[in-house]
Amino acid sequence: MGYTHYYTINGWDEAEWQSAWPILTNEVPMIVEAADVLVTGPLDDDSRITPLVADPVRGIWLNGVAEDEHEPFRLSQTVQKEWCKTARKPYDIAVACVLLRAYLLAPGIVQLHSDEDWDRDWKEARHLYIDLWPGESCWCPWDEHDAPQEAILKSTEQNIVIKAPRPSAATYIQAIQAQASTYVDKQGPFSLPISISQCGPTTLHLDETYMKPIRQWLARCEGEASHSNCLPLTIHWPASAGVQFRVIDIHRRCIAVAPENCRYIALSYVWGAVDQPKLTMDVSNELAKEGGLAAIWPKIPQTVRDAIAFCDGLGERYLWVDALCIMQDSPRDMRLSILRMRQIYAAAKCTLGAISANTASAGLSASFRADACTCLTADALYRVIDLSPWSRRAWCYQEKVLSHRMIFFTSRGLYMQCQSGVYSGAGAPLPRENKYPELNRYNTVGGMLSANIGDTNGLQSYLSAVEHYSSRTTTKRTDKMNAFQGILQMYEGVMDGTASTFYVGLPAFAFDLAICWRAEQHNPEFRNPAFPSWSWLGWGQAVRFHPAMALEKAHTNQMFASLNVSKQFDIMKQNGPGFREIAKLRNPANHINDFNGFGFPASTGQIRCPPSLSLDASIAKLSIASEPKGSNNHNNCYAFYPLPSSGTSPPLGYIWLHEQWRAQQEALCIIDFMPLLGNPDAERPGKWTIKMLMCLDPVNGNEQRGYLKYERLQVMDCELCEEAWLNMGGVTAEFLDLV
């Protein structure tokens, strides 16, 4: 039946299941959120996205959205025996994890098996489960030899194996409710007899002369009607066991669970190679005690100490700092907090930016005094920010563009920015020298907030955000996606009025356009193997899009692996409404009905291990010249020719490649190319002009198992009619895997 999961509840009224069922339904929203997939409940008459269903009475009901939709997953007292065919679409990870959780909560009641391989196909669901329930046993439900004799967990403190008692449903849910409603300041404000100066030195001179203009700016920004767009959002922190929204309580000098409607300041800074204290499970209880920060104060890096002192001088009680407010050794806390970064910064009263500090030990600023401001225009300040260490850190991009207000600490003074203007530390407005280009508005404070994007600029804002973010660096390669999650979450599954998910960082509804990104240069050493080569996430360098792409209004997603089933069937038949609709915008390749014809890459509909793209694509072999026509740093510009090449025929175009990569190839370098982008020929109805080619690099074992496997090497512009392409030997390749 394809990629299908089969499940049965053998004894709904049994005590084991009656204990497990309320726990499971309570945990389903957390599983879906942690899976980072967009799902819907039963669609209404307008086919709008509705909340997923997860409660003990109505049961569980969820499905993917738009192109990710397939069969709904259902489990309730009236649906105890069922199967769910997900076709390996993104929502499968949530379905598989829910089923795995159901089985491991009640292994004597739940019967579960799947068409697919536990080690390979269930890998993502298993990793998600382990992140959410670290230490719990996890085994294959349909492999009796894999199951342990009893559920066990490993004690992280004593490194011994102990039995894992399962709490009752009532106890479990009461614990979550208590966690969500228990706040450290219910007894009212309380200040410790421990001052900042007693804890240790800071680099700031918190003179009232310098603090007063900042307080006045904040008060004006909060109170005046003209600053209505500057007001922070209200944070909504779903109750999940072990995942709390914590802040530094400056009055009590400890780490605390944020009170309801908490007004807090956030810090954005560069960690650097600094060994700083972090919130971990073994120290969390001590740091939560009144005065708990005093013991680690000397080890807290200078930037964080300065931020605490600054908030204290400003009269603010709460500060959010990632290292001390996220449980760093809790995979569940880390995963969910990363996905909630959009909320954290958008709900902050203000964000402090340590702009000129290249490590956390540098302090907020050496030039805090308001009269030290030497940037006389907003543009001068932007140039200082753009050239700063802070603007090279990937995480800091979303922290800037999702904040409503920021205070910048720079080597050229202190500055403030909200949605209404930019100000010096003395509160004087800074004029603009000239207007930034429109796309650059998505690289400023609050630029990626929903209010600044609107209903029609979704794709435009996304393309710009990728361009600004991609040049920044992360210490861990896998964080390339994590540090951009706040941006992706901001769209809430809708872009330009169309329901759309993201697939490895690319919007599904405009996938065929978004995959046409290009790097400024070809640098194989910047390849990030944590992500596929076809995604910009797979490369550690700046990428850009053609400006005209942001103006496109008609979009396709032929290459996306989750094409709608009926549309996919129409494409394979080269007929039907689905084919006629998409063929107007992008002629799809098809190896069954038109092997010798021309077409742009289209999904085969075959289920492969994500995140590869299984495609039908028109492929031609072209030769790349051995001598360059020009050079730029270590990149050379090479001509490429059709085969056979006499050496005197004019080139088809030019491609930039790294000189070392070209030197490693044969003198007669023959490479596969694939048409990626094109337009209908206005003068010849039914014909197409190719505008962009992708150069494909074969992966070792390229022709194993009957399909071709490639990585993206480079793209280049061209101007070729489809007849010329076919004359050069272009044929449709079956089962081309782009990885």
Image (cartoon, rainbow, N blue to C red):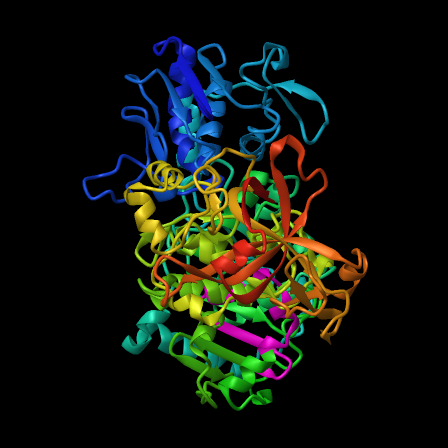
Instruction: Give how far across and how far down residue 178 sits, in percent.
Output: 41, 36
Q: Is residue 380 above or below residue 233?
A: below
Most foreground residue, 412 or 719: 719
Residue 612 appears in the figure: yes
* Up/down of 220 relative to 99, above or below: below
Placement of the N terminus among the 4 image quadrants: top left
Count the labels in the image: 0
Q: Is residue 92 above or below residue 582?
A: above
Which picture quadrant has residue 365? Answer: bottom right
Residue drawn at point x = 21 percent, y = 39 percent: 44
User: Residue 384, how many percent across, how many down?
Assistant: 60, 81
| Magenta-colored span | 385-413
Q: Residue drawn at (27%, 76%), measured in percent from left and top?
A: 225
The vertical placement of 463 against 707, above or below, is below
Instruction: State left or right for residue 110 relative to residue 498.
Output: right
**Which residue occupies the extreme left position in the image?**
45
Q: Which of 305 and 451 is in front in this view?
A: 451
Residue 203: give x, y in percent of width and height.
67, 74
Is residue 308 toward the left or the right of residue 587 in the image? right
Q: Does the magenta stretch include residue 333?
A: no
In the foreground, 85 or 565? 565
* 43 left or right of 424 in image: left
Q: Quadrant of residue 307?
A: bottom right
Q: Is residue 399 magenta?
A: yes
Quarter of the image with the C terminus is top right
Q: Can residue 231 be seen in this view?
A: no
